[in-house]
C-alpha cells in the first residue's frame, strides 16, 4: 500500500474476502476503483446499479469475428469484485477493469474461463492445517488474530509464496505489466486514493515502487489484437464450481452464498435448509433432527479448536443425523444446496447479440423460463402457444443449442398432437447464440440458413432427409422447397438401396408431423412414395451375399422402413410387405435377415403360424449349421417372446433343436442365444422356462379354474376397449 494506491488482494469468490473488501472500501472512500477484469467491459459497469441485475451473473467477452473465442468473468453476490462494483456504482465512484484486454487474449489462444488453476489462499490454508480456505480466512484474518490489517498480511504471505514459485508464465507477466500501466495512468490522471481489487497472487507484482515503465512497455509491445464485444449474461452457482472446469472455481458456491448472506445463527439456518431439501424428497426429517445436528456440528468445531462450525462440521452432522449415514442422501444435499443451481438475472435492455436478443424476446413472449434445473415440458401442438414453443425449441436444436431435448415419450409418439421435452438451460448457450449470428440475425433466420447448408449437391440422402424433417418440425418454410428439390435430385441419382432405406424413415415422420402442424406435405409424400418403390425393387438384390455385420445393418434398416410404411398408409404397407415376401422366398438371404423378415410377415398376417413352424423347422434341422440356425432365431424372435409363450408348436420346434445340439457346437451358439433370449423381459424368460420344463418332464400345465362370475364382470369393459358389442 501507498497513500495513493491501496491493494486489496482477494480470493476470487470468497465471502470472507468480499466482507473485507466492503469494510476496506468504506474506510478508504477511494476516488477510483480498479478491478481485475477485461477493460472492454468498462461501459457495462453501470448496469450493475440496476436492481434487476441479480447475481450470479457473468461478463461475456467474445471475438467479433469468431464467437468460439470467448471468455466468461463470473460474479456471485459473495464475489469481492462484485461487491467492489456495487460499492462504486452506489457511491458514484469511477470504476474500471484493469486486467490485460480480452482483445490481446483472444488473439493469442481461445479460452472460456479465467483464473489460475491453483488457489494461493488455499495453499496457505493447507499449510496451516485447514481443509477449507474460507474457514482459515475467517479464523486467521477476519477475527484479527494477527492484530494487523488483513490485506497487508495477505500481501506478505503472497510475497513469500511467489519467492518459492518463480515460474510465472508469459501471460501472467503480461497481465501484471498491463495492470501496472493502468495504475500509472490513473495516478497521472490525478486520482489520489485508488483501490485496486485483484487476485491476491498479483499483489506483490503491483506494489510500488514499480519497475521502469519502459520495462512493462517491452513486455506488452507487439501483442496481437482482435475486435471484441462484451455483454452481461446470467450465470449459475454450479458453473462457479471447479467441477464445471472453471479455472478459479470453488467447491461449494451454495455454502459460500450462505456464509455471506446469513447475518446470524449460520449453522442453524444452514441445517434448516438441509432439512427442507430432504423433506422435498419425502424423507423424514424432524425439528429434533435439526437441533441434534446443530449440537453435533458445534461440538465438532469445539473439539477441533475452531471458533465456528465450518463446511466439514455441518457436512458430518448432516451425514450422521439428518441422512442417517446414507451417502445418496448426502449427495442430494451437496448437489441441491452445497453447490446449488441458483440462476442470476440481467436487466432488460442489456446489450446482446442479435440472435440472443431475439431468443430473449421470444422466450418472454412464450413464457419459457431459463431454468438450470432439468424439468419436463408437455406441449399440445393444437394449442397456439404449444406449437410456437415447439418450433422455437426445434429451431434451437438446428443451431446446436439443446435447451430442450425431446423426451423418450415424445420420440415414441411421433405423428401425434403431443410432445414432451426435457428442458435445462446452460450458461454456455450464450456463446452458441453469439456464434449463431454468422447465419442470421434471428433464431428462425439462422436456423433456415443452417438447414440450407445441409442440402447442397454434396449432401448425402440421410443428411437431406434429416434437414427436411427439421424444416417441418421447426417450421422453416423458406428452406423446405430447396430441400425437397435436393432430395428428389439425389434420390433419383442414388442406386444404393441401403441409402434409400436410411432416407425413408425421416421422410415418413416429416409427413406425419407436417399433417399435425397444418403443413402441405403433398410434395413430400410423392417423393417418399417414389423412394419406397425403388427400395422395394432393390431390396431382394441388396439382401444377397451379405456377411454377418452387413446383415445386421440391413436388418436395422428393414425395421426402420417397416415402421415408416405404417405412417405412409395401407398402399405403402402392402407394397413393402410384397418386397419382404420376395426376400423371404430367396434362399440366398442371410439367416438373420430371413428370420427377421419372416417375423414381420407373420406379425402382418402374411404368413400363417403353421407356415412359420415349417420354415423354422427347416432352419433348425441337423443339416443346418448351428450358428446359422441361431442367427435365424435371433432375427425371428427379436420381435418379442409372446410367440414362444402362446404357441406350443414353435416352442416344441425350438425345444427339440436345442436338445439335439452337440455339446461342442452348443458352446459356439450360446452367445447368440443369450443375446436373443437375454433381450426378453424377466417374467417372459421365466414363463418360457417353466413351460419348457413341464413339457420336457411330461407334467401337464396347470390351468387355473375360471371364475365365470368374475370374468363376466370384465366383459363390458373389454368390449368397450376393443370397440365391439
Image (cartoon, helix red, strand yellow):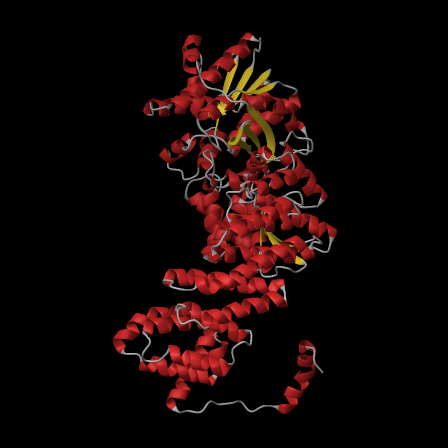
Q: Quadrant of residue 707?
A: bottom right
Q: Quadrant of residue 669?
A: bottom left
Residue 684: horizontal and vertical position, in percent? 47, 76
Which of 430/554 is in front? 554
Residue 492: horizontal and vertical position, in percent? 54, 52
Residue at 36%, 25% (x, y): give it: 161
Figure label count: 0
Q: Is residue 209 above or below residue 641?
A: above
Q: Taking 286 as reference, is 145 left or right? A: left
Image quarter in which the C terminus is found: bottom right
Which of 619/54 is in front? 619
Residue at 57%, 67% (x, y): give it: 575
Residue at 60%, 18% (x, y): give it: 29
Kindly tell me whether residue 597 is visible in this rendering. Answer: yes
Kindly tell me whether residue 156 is visible in this rendering. Answer: no
Residue at 36%, 69% (x, y): give it: 672
Q: Is residue 306 above or below residue 217?
A: below
Q: Is residue 70 above or below residue 679?
A: above
* Residue that lies at the very extreme toward the right in this rendered image: 384
Which of 103/6 is in front? 103
Q: Taking 89 as reference, is 539 left or right? A: left
Residue 312: horizontal and vertical position, in percent? 45, 45
Residue 254: horizontal and vertical position, in percent? 54, 42
Amino acid at each position: 500500500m501507498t497513500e495513493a494506491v491501496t491493494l486489496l488482494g482477494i480470493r476470487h469468490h470468497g465471502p470472507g474476502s468480499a466482507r473485507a473488501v466492503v469494510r476496506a472500501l468504506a474506510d478508504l472512500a477511494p476516488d477510483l476503483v480498479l478491478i481485475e477484469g477485461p477493460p472492454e467491459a468498462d461501459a457495462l459497469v453501470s448496469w450493475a446499479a440496476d436492481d434487476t441485475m441479480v447475481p450470479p451473473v457473468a461478463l461475456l467477452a467474445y471475438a467479433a469475428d469468431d464467437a468460439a473465442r470467448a471468455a466468461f468473468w463470473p460474479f456471485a453476490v459473495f464475489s469481492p469484485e462484485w461487491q467492489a462494483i456495487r460499492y462504486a456504482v452506489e457511491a458514484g465512484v469511477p470504476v474500471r477493469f484493469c486486467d490485460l484486454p480480452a482483445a490481446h487474449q483472444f488473439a493469442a489462444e481461445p479460452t472460456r474461463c479465467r483464473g489460475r488453476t491453483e488457489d494461493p489462499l488455499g495453499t496457505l490454508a493447507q499449510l496451516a492445517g485447514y481443509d477449507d480456505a474460507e474457514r482459515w480466512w475467517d479464523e486467521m484474518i477476519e477475527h484479527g488474530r494477527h492484530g494487523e490489517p488483513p490485506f497487508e498480511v495477505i500481501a506478505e504471505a503472497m510475497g513469500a509464496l511467489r519467492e518459492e514459485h518463480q515460474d510465472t508464465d508469459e501471460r501472467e507477466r503480461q497481465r501484471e505489466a498491463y495492470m501496472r500501466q493502468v495504475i500509472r495512468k490513473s495516478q497521472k490522471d490525478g486520482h489520489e486514493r485508488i483501490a485496486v481489487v485483484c487476485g491476491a497472487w498479483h499483489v506483490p507484482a503491483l506494489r510500488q515502487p514499480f519497475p521502469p515503465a519502459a520495462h512493462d512497455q517491452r513486455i506488452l509491445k507487439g501483442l496481437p489484437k482482435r475486435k471484441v464485444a462484451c455483454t452481461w449474461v446470467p450465470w449459475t452457482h454450479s458453473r462457479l464450481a471447479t467441477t464445471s472446469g472453471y479455472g478459479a472455481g470453488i467447491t461449494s458456491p451454495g455454502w459460500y452464498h450462505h456464509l455471506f448472506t446469513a447475518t446470524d445463527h449460520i449453522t442453524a439456518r444452514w441445517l434448516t435448509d438441509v432439512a427442507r431439501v430432504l423433506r422435498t424428497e419425502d424423507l423424514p426429517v424432524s425439528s429434533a433432527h435439526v437441533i441434534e445436528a446443530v449440537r453435533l456440528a458445534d461440538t465438532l468445531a469445539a473439539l477441533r479448536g475452531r471458533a465456528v462450525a465450518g463446511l466439514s462440521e455441518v457436512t458430518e452432522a448432516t451425514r450422521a443425523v439428518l441422512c442417517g449415514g446414507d451417502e445418496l442422501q448426502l449427495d442430494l444435499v451437496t448437489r441441491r444446496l452445497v453447490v446449488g443451481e441458483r440462476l442470476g438475472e440481467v436487466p432488460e435492455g442489456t446489450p446482446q447479440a442479435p440472435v440472443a436478443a431475439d431468443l430473449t424476446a421470444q422466450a418472454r413472449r412464450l413464457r419459457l423460463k431459463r431454468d438450470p434445473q432439468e424439468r419436463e415440458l408437455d406441449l399440445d401442438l393444437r394449442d397456439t402457444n404449444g406449437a410456437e414453443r415447439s418450433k422455437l425449441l426445434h429451431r434451437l436444436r438446428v443451431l446446436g443449442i439443446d435447451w430442450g431435448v425431446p423426451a423418450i415419450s415424445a420420440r415414441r409418439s411421433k405423428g401425434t398432437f403431443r410432445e414432451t421435452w426435457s428442458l435445462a438451460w446452460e450458461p454456455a448457450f450464450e456463446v452458441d447464440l453469439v456464434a449463431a449470428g454468422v447465419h442470421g440475425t434471428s433464431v428462425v433466420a439462422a436456423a433456415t440458413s443452417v438447414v440450407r447448408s445441409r442440402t447442397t449437391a454434396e449432401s448425402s440422402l440421410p443428411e437431406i432427409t434429416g434437414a427436411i424433417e427439421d424444416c417441418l418440425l421447426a417450421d422453416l418454410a423458406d428452406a423446405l422447397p430447396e430441400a425437397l428439390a435436393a432430395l428428389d435430385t439425389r434420390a433419383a441419382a442414388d442406386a444404393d438401396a441401403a441409402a434409400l432405406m436410411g432416407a425413408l424413415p425421416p421422410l415418413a415422420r416429416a409427413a406425419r408431423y407436417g399433417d399435425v402442424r397444418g403443413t402441405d406435405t403433398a410434395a413430400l409424400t410423392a417423393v417418399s412414395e417414389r423412394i419406397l418403390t425403388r427400395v422395394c425393387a432393390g431390396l431382394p438384390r441388396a439382401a444377397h451375399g451379405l456377411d454377418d455385420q452387413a446383415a445386421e445393418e440391413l436388418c436395422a434398416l428393414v425395421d426402420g422402413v417397416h415402421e415408416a410404411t405404417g405412417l405412409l398408409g395401407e398402399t405403402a404397407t402392402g407394397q413393402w410387405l410384397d418386397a419382404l415376401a420376395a426376400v423371404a422366398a430367396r434362399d440366398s438371404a442371410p439367416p438373420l435377415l430371413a428370420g427377421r423378415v419372416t417375423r414381420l410377415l407373420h406379425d402382418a398376417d402374411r404368413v400363417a403360424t403353421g407356415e412359420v413352424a415349417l420354415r423354422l423347422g427347416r432352419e433348425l434341422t441337423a443339416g443346418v449349421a448351428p450358428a446359422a440356425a441361431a442367427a435365424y432365431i435371433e432375427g425371428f424372435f427379436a420381435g418379442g417372446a409372446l410367440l414362444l409363450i402362446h404357441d406350443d408348436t414353435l416352442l416344441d420346434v425350438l425345444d427339440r433343436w436345442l436338445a439335439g445340439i452337440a455339446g461342442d457346437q452348443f458352446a459356439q451358439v450360446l452367445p447368440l442365444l443369450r443375446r436373443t433370449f437375454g433381450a426378453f423381459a424377466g417374467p417372459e424368460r421365466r414363463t418360457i422356462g417353466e413351460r419348457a420344463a413341464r413339457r420336457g418332464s411330461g407334467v401337464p400345465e396347470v390351468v387355473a379354474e375360471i371364475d365365470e362370475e368374475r370374468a363376466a364382470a370384465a366383459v363390458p369393459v373389454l368390449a368397450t376397449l376393443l370397440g365391439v358389442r
